[in-house]
Image (cartoon, helix red, strand yellow):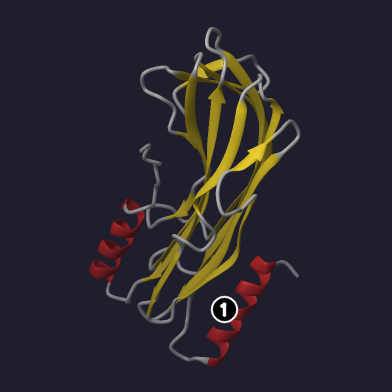
Amino acid sequence: MSRFHRVILAGLLTAAFHPTAKAIAIYDVEASSSFTVISTGGMVITAEPTIVPGGNNSTSTTGTGVASLDTDGQSPVGAGPVALGVGDSVTQISELSGSADAPGGTSAASILNSMLIVLTNTSLTTSAEAEFLFTYTWDASISRTSADLEAAIANPFFHLSGFAPSGAETLEVDSGGGRIPLAEFLVDNTIDLTPSEADLSDSTMGSLSVSVFVTVLADRTDSFEVINDATGNAIHAAPAPAVASLMLLGFAAGAWRRRSVRS
């Protein structure tokens, strides 16, 4: 039995044994990725967590809400920067689940992971280009039993961010159709159930790989972040139509997003 189905079963059992618990909204999110060195281009490359496991994670609930941080991990994790050579990978996983049950329950959870990749071009005269393979996998599910009173959001989120605005380092990404220059690479697979739609469930899952090329000018050290996040929210509003509509609309409008800030 999958973790998602165990959460659903727990919610149904809760509803069966608690007369006031007549409905439940559920979210389940997994985001995992690997960032592998294919070529260093002659540069020195290191990795270091900018958010260490458990360092910036959160849950919040009200009423009969439940939130769980299920898996939170990174590799490598050391006391300082870890050198990366050809074939070495940065791996990250963020996995959580939760539910909101009547009356007036809410649930929110987030697991934020990121790694700082630092590239040093020791050549005094020529630019250097490193190549990476970024593979990211996501699996997210949401469900509810009442379209009028419940809402849920699940957000697996991946981001290559923090590239120099000055152009001192450049990013190109090839997803199979050729190399494309980008300022950042962002994958946002949000799914949501709001009062504007009648669906009671939604899900998304997949795994993709892209080639990543980063060029650094001569005699420069530059860096960027590899971000791997998961967030989820669920709400069951008290059964007063006007209040419920306002709560759910506010909930949907507040869907979480993160952007990295380069220091």
**Residue at 64%, 14% in the rendered image:** 178
**Residue at 32%, 76% in the rendered image:** 239
Residue 257, placed above or below residue 213: below
Residue 95, placed above or below residue 59: above
Viewer-closest of 136 and 19: 136
Viewer-closest of 127 and 26: 127
Residue at the disc numbered 1: 11
Residue 222, placed above or below residue 28: above
Secondary structure found at label 1:
helix
Where the C terminus falls, by quadrant?
top left
Give the x, y percent position of residue 6: 67, 74
Viewer-closest of 187 and 85: 85
Residue 202, placed above or below residue 88: below
Horizontal side of residue 215 vs 152, given as left or right = right
Give the x, y percent position of residue 256: 39, 52
Give the x, y percent position of residue 60: 40, 71
Residue type at tag 1: Gly
